[in-house]
Image (cartoon, coloured by chain):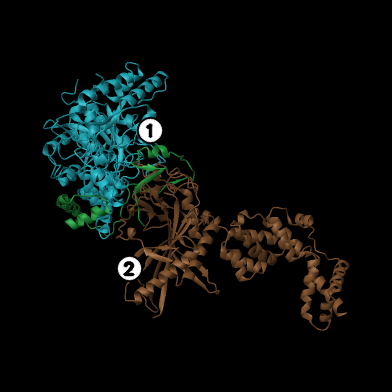
Amino acid sequence: MSLDAEQVKKIAHLARIEINEADIPGYAATLSNILDLVDQMAAVNTDDVEPMAHPMDASQRLRADVVTETNQREQFQSVAPKTEDGLYLVPQVIE
Amino acid sequence: MQWEVVIGLEIHAQLMTNSKIFSGASIAYGAEPNTQACAVDLGLPGVLPVLNTEAVRMAAKFGLAIGANVSRHSVFARKNYFYPDLPKGYQISQMELPIVETGKLEIELKDGTKKIIGVTRAHLEEDAGKSLHEDYQGMTGIDLNRAGTPLLEIVSEPDMRSAEEAVAYMRKIHSLVQYIGICDGNMAEGSFRCDANVSVRPKGQQEYGTRAELKNINSFKFVEKAINIEVERQIELIEDGGTVVQETRLYDADKNETRSMRSKEEANDYRYFPDPDLLPVVLDDAYLAAVKATLPELPDVKRDRFIAQYGLSSVDAGILTVSRATADYFEKAAELSAAAKLAANWVMGEVSASLNKNDLDINSCPVTAEMLAGMLKRIEDNTISGKIAKEVFEAMWAGEGDADAVIDKKGLKQITDSSAIEALVDEVIANNPAQAAEFKAGKEQLMGFFVGQIMKASKGKANPAQVNQLLKQKLSS
Amino acid sequence: MYHNKTLAELSAMLQAGEVTSVELTQHFLDRIKSKDGDINSFITVTEEQALAQAKAADERIAAGNGVALTGLPFAQKDIFCTQGVRSSCGSKMLDNFNSPYDATVVSKLKQAGAVMLGKTNMDEFAMGSSNETSFYGAVKNPWDLKKVPGGSSGGSAAAVAARLAPAATGTDTGGSIRQPASLCNLTGLKPTYGRVSRYGMIAFASSLDQAGPMARTAEDCALLMNAMAGFDEKDSTSIDKEVPDYSAGLNQSVKGLKIGLPKEFFGEGLDPKVAECVDVAIRQYQDMGAEIIDISLPNSGLSVPVYYVVAPAECSSNLSRMDGVRFGHRCDEPKDLEDLYKRSRGEGFGEEVKRRILIGTYALSAGYYDAYYIKAQKLRRLISDDFKQAFEQVDVIMGPTSPNVAFNMGEKSDDPVSMYLSDIYTIAVNLAGLPGMSIPAGFADEMPVGLQLIGNYFEESRLLNVAHAYQQQTDWHQRCPSGFED
């Protein structure tokens, strides 16, 4: 499987990563190499195999419905790039 | 061309837990921005989700209430997309294996017809935060207090064929989730929200038309309006030779129109996959049986019982059982007063009107069911008339005490002493000789005039039946 | 000198009052100052905090409340969130991220009274096998400064190898503890998935990541494991299972131990000199009374392709939270929301991280999900089942940790696929969720060779015991790179 420049752009957009136009052919080439490696998977028939999402054959533990957290806004927002009146700020969202 | 409308609803009900679905932060409404967003809700690097047991129990309860299959094995998946109110860049939801599958509900329309609406699935997921579009240095403010609030997304089959059916279905779910105590149903605060998938097709056609998704319609009234206006738009569009595009549209209540949400229009590829931070949720039969045992009497069953037990009409029983609180209020008043029909009329009439006027919930009604029953007893034993009862009710509402206290204090006890009424009758006849003569000459319509005069003279307290009887005697003698 | 002693030896000295934690801590801080310039193993040195912790540890020991780790200095991989201290994960994206909270592993080590010297360099977001992808520059291998230390826990490995810290924490998603341990002549343990809490460990691939100790001896790894392991209610994938005393099981005999040698680990691609060291080590075990059994892990050959679907898929989603809104790098003057996302992420992530996010995004996208992600998950089960069958026959599985000794810096950085293949023997263990170790087993071309031990689920104790037994008979693990003895 190989990826062309258009596909790389499309994936980069989905992943919201800016890639310089000049770097796209390089990404297309290395990503295609990785996909060639990955395509080795096709060699084994897995028709009757149950997918394994997780190494442990366990089930989800449930947490008691108790409020344990207190307001730590100051501390959390001390690492935020841009805030005002306790809100995180982003460029205007148009709906 | 005859068009058929096809509607499916996706209802988001916020679950009434104490804490969030995956963190120990509070879900209380109305806190200062971001004061209830903990490290997990903010999606800080390294944090992990742990599932709230109550959210699971409530979802199971809903599934059992609609006779659905509650999955013994459900899986959380990540729905990946970027949006500022979605801190992790993905929403933890359920995709292939939801907790509730294939249930159904019966709705009843205004003309009494009944219809079964299929519920495809209901799954657990986390709510997003809120974007505040007021101007902050020309930017949008993000409040993540709501992020991580547990939601049950209830997805219907595309079984509805009119806005009326859609509203009836939505009301039914709204009533049910409150009945079983999993959602407060508060639409103003966004605890109960609805998206509608709307399409049209020529009558008789098998395939569905292309649908538009109407987002976040936050009242029953708007659901109806939004669907109708969207249906109109689609039909006009097609009849003018256009085609409907699959897209998300926002209902603008001020302009009564739907418009395309361009920001969400681009091709969505959510890249769902099982969330590796969470394991499968496994429920066994014993668990489900225990949850089932906590289910209250459901609205349909209660309605049928009200008809049988209290002799109410189907319509009245339906109205009284829409909300569990109203049903409980009615039932208490009916039991205590032993006057069920009267209680029904008062609950649907004066009580409900006063609550509406004062924008109050029945749980905070100043006239309790006990107080109402006390008053109904006085109507039943002829201490007061229905008309005087309204005055008593108002006084009780205003906090002037229970019915007996009000009747006593205001001297509203009905006059049933015949001699006292007779004196009033005589006095009114004597004061209106001309009308008396006309009556005797055959103008019997004047009966009402005399009754009115007498009731006025008695300040409404004369027993109307006795007044009528004495008047007839006197005027015809 | 203190730096040539093991954790266990230093612990005994502290308990006996022969040295104070402040003295030890100062000693290592001085070594970092004088020697780390060449190696670049630390991103952040927390001198002030370390000395304060050391002082508190001395008081605790004096009060008779110390435990084995109290007062012992160690280095923390920068993947762990440390409250108030930069937690960069080797990335520009988190260069300014002073975590507002502590990871569970961090609090556990704090509770034990261990003294954190600083945060070690690593491949960016743990994606790499050479420590060349770090935003903070490559780490050099103390055994040969032209060579890589391995990755992603390359800073931890180099720091311990150079005696800048007696031990360190690491994390292992596809070999990131074992491979650098092998390349730097250390003992490293990747525990069973779920044995050590992942809370506060910045996620790379959630279903594979596991933290563990890196030290010079198995005995020291046991000491660290005693503090690190255990159930954590904040991690849904953490296993609620009693933690044994790992130190207590070290001295059992390995007589009669059944060692499985998977033929797939000794085939093409393995450097013959590495193979020879491994053979010698295995003969040593035979001499100690172990039984050798040839086994096969027929699907393990596909572990690299499977890993390069599963890990990128999970990481593409895990790293979406790095969006310039609540923490981390944000581009200047974003003109709109999309610009904010794209430039913040474009600027904040390095090339290898971007590659993996893109591969993962692609593998999960509509139309490819079944062919890549589901296929990989099915193969993951087959790989895991191979191990299950093998462990019906044997007690531990052994083989090389890495096909080669440390390679030259820059040698593989332009060829991601050849870099990925350096984890060919370690990745299957993560896919299955099993515990694995690497222990020093000799030298090839004067560079360290690691022997990999793989155990059944929750058999860390046995692995440590088997490793310790070997270290009682050999002295490879005591070798020190030249220039770092004094």
Q: Which element carries disc 1, helix, strand or loop?
A: helix
Q: Is residue B186 left or right of residue C278?
A: right
Q: How many marks?
A: 2
Report the front residue among B97 and B242.
B242
Name the colour assigned to chain B in the rendering: brown
Q: Which element carries disc 2, helix, strand or loop?
A: loop
Task: Tell which tag, 1 or 2, sits nearer the viewer.
Answer: 2
Q: Which chain is green?
A: A
Q: What separation in Å lies between label 1 and label 2 (alpha carbons)?
A: 54 Å
Q: Which residue is mark 2?
A: B245
Is B386 drawn above or below residue B29 in the view shown?
Answer: below
Q: Chain ID for label 2?
A: B
Residue at (35, 17) in percent of width and height: C16
Q: Amino acid at mark 1?
A: Ser
Picture quarter containing residue C157? top left
Is B230 drawn above or below residue B275 in the view shown?
Answer: below
Q: Which chain is cyan?
A: C
Report the front residue among A11 and C67.
A11
Residue at (64, 59) in percent of width and height: B329
Is C188 drawn above or below residue C433 in the view shown?
Answer: above
Query: Cβ–Cβ below 8 Å for labels 1 and 2?
Result: no
Residue at (13, 45) in percent of width and height: C268
Task: Using a 10 Å C-alpha cutoff, classify the residue at mark 2 as few (fewer than 14 neighbours), some (14 to 19) or many (20 or more).
Answer: few
Q: Which mark is residue C107?
A: 1
Q: Residue furthest top?
A: C18
Q: Is residue B260 left or right of residue B170?
A: left
